[in-house]
Amino acid sequence: MVASTPALSKVHPDWLDLFPQEFQDANTLLISLQEYFPKYEDVFNVFISSPKAVKVVIVGQDPYPTPGDATGLAFSVNRETRLPKSLLNIFKELKDDLGIERSNGNLEDWQRQGVFLINRILTTPAGKPLGHKELGWEEFTEKIIAYLGNQGAVALLMGKPAQEMGKYFERKVEVPHPSPLSAYRGLFGSKPFSTINSLLDKPIIW
């Protein structure tokens, strides 16, 4: 049985039943860290929903390194936070693709519909993107992503690091990363959201 902590208390019991040792190890890693984002109690927010509810997996790299931005969900920010450029580009393509215009960067509504927004690295130091690379997060999140792929989830993989996880999914959409450096290299006009919905029995309201 996984020991309860404030961070793990948000994790759906189904996850803890499936991966007891992995979550214990992940929590031990988290406790060893200092001064990181998102907040301690938010690090495992992506696991609030049961794995049985997951329909779509979106893979990010690591949390936003700016105070107040990271929520524990990949690409998501707090409602009052100014939108990061990558998220602005995602929303630009969403509008062009499905005509949906979003100004709210909190993506919990996607999560509630079965979109699993996981970063490969679950924490980052202030002002240091990828500062917690190769501490052990990647091994943990790869196991989770592989499980969801084997359960038949659809993947939206933006950029090469995310596309490394493509081997676990039979159904996937791969596009360039939404960062300003790469969004113009094929993200815009790729229509990933309508393509994902075409693969689902019940479409996501993006």
Image (tube, rainbow, N blue to C red):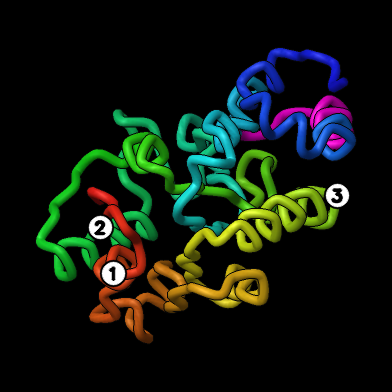
| Mark sitting on residue 135 | 3
Residue at image mark 1: 198
**Is 91 left, or right, of 177 in this rendering?**
left
Residue 153 visible in the shown view: yes
Where, by quadrant of the figure, is residue 10 drawn? top right
Q: Looking at the image, which residue is at 32% across and 58% down?
A: 201
Of the pair 124 and 29, the residue shown nearer to us: 29
- Name the amino acid, label 2: Phe
- Name the amino acid, label 3: Leu
**Is 132 left, or right, of 67 in this rendering?**
right
CB atoms at circles 1 and 3 under 8 Å apart?
no
Q: Residues within 10 Å of mark 3 (few under 14, many from 20)?
A: few
Q: Looking at the image, which residue is at 29% across and 63% down?
A: 197
Secondary structure under badge 2? Answer: helix
Looking at the image, is mark 1 or mark 3 earlier in the sequence? Answer: 3
Secondary structure under badge 1? Answer: helix
Percent of width and height locating residue 131 = 73, 51
Quarter of the image with the N terminus is top right
- Name the amino acid, label 1: Ser
| Mark sitting on residue 172 | none
User: Which portion, as a residue range, is magenta?
Assistant: 25-37
Q: Looking at the image, which residue is at 59% across and 74% down?
A: 163
| Mark sitting on residue 91 | 2
Q: Residues within 10 Å of mark 1 (few under 14, many from 20)?
A: few
